[in-house]
Amino acid sequence: MNEVTKHAIDADKLLAVVIAVTKEARPHVEPHATLDSSLEKDLGLDSLARVELVLRLERKFDASLPEQALATSETPRDLLRFLLGSVGHEARIADITVVAPVQGEGVRAPSNQQAATLPEALAYHVKRQPDRLTVFLYEEGNEFPLSYQTLWDGAMGYAARLAEAGLQPGQMVAIMLPTCKEYLYCFYGVMLAGGVPVPLYPPARLTTIEDHMSRHVGILKSAGATIMVTVPEAKPLAYLLRAQVESLNQILTPTDFATASGKDFSPRHRKPGDMGFLQYTSGSTGNPKGVDVARNSAVVKPVVVHRRHNFGIARFFGRF
């Protein structure tokens, strides 16, 4: 085996083979796979399909796998370990390998007539492919896949709770959360409630929360935020900001949305040209400035949405 082949073990290519075999074995199912998907429980591959999978992988990577690869592998990551070992690499490399999830092509992205705003684009996919994976989050070694339906349900719960808190159409909601599923629920939830998300960086360290919050007073005043959603540790300090930010009425944390349900909530639709979200510059060359992104623009701007393309933000992967 030549040196080029030895370095050709690619986790993305492995997942592509897994998906191809799964689609052939279960043609009526739209599969998606991660390195830690169960070959049997998640992908539905029986013993014959797993035999075919091992053979395909051997051909794809010009490798020879031991019998244990078929007998003991329960996930694609297990197969990756055997493939790495077969070409002389340390199998433990598989344990720290992170890749974006792979799935079938799915339905086409909506046209402007089918979905003119970001909430409409989400609703479009929920109706046509609710179980399709749209976001994959990595948090402290744990993986959190979100389907369109899961994202919609979470966002609707947030929307209902925000409306209950008094959010009116067009009002600003400051979101100071780390990259997590709650952030996504909140961002979409604000829009579904008719509000305007104002994304803010969370504090990098808990020890700097006070300074971090005080430096955002100008942004909160400029935006006219009426509600702020932040981490629990920042809530007491955020309440102190209310004396400096007259528009700020409520401070909420993800725990305040834990029991929220959007089952009976009807999304508040706004026009495509209305403000979609308000993004502030870093302020490295002066005071932070707000950039108004219209709702129809948000559908195609990669800074917010992942349409047709995969991209990463820290350890976050998404597709829209």
Image (cartoon, rainbow, N blue to C red):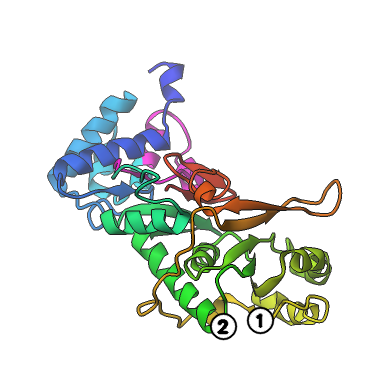
Question: Which residue corresponds to the image point at 39% horizontal and 69% vertical from the top-left?
Answer: 153
Q: Give the residue type that dot 1 points to.
A: Gln
Q: CA distance from mark 1 to mark 2?
A: 8 Å
Residue 63 visible in the displayed image: no
Residue 15 visible in the displayed image: yes
Between residue 187 and residue 73, name the one nearer to us: 187
Q: Is residue 50 above or below residue 217?
A: above
Q: Is residue 29 above or below residue 187?
A: above
Mark 1 or mark 2: name the one nearer the start of the chain: 2
Q: Please identify the quadrant where the N terminus is shown.
A: top left
- Which residues make up the magenta segment? 80-106
Tally of numbered tags: 2
Name the mark on residue 250.
1
Dot 2 falls on a residue whose secondary structure is: loop
Question: Which residue corresponds to the image point at 77% horizontal and 53% vertical from the top-left?
Answer: 289
Q: Is residue 95 magenta?
A: yes
Q: Are marks 1 and 2 in contact (CB under 8 Å)?
A: yes
Label 1 CA crowd tier, 10 Å (few <14, some 14–19, many 20+): some
Question: Which residue corresponds to the image point at 33% horizontal and 54% vertical from the top-left?
Answer: 125
Q: Which residue is mark 2?
A: 165
Name the mark on residue 14.
none
Q: Position of residue 78 (x, y in %)?
A: 35, 46
Name the side, left or right, on which 148 lies relative to 136: left
Name the side, left or right, on which 302 lies relative to 125: right
Q: Is residue 208 above or below residue 20?
A: below
Dot 1 falls on a residue whose secondary structure is: strand
Question: Which residue corresponds to the image point at 34% horizontal and 40% vertical from the top-left?
Answer: 15
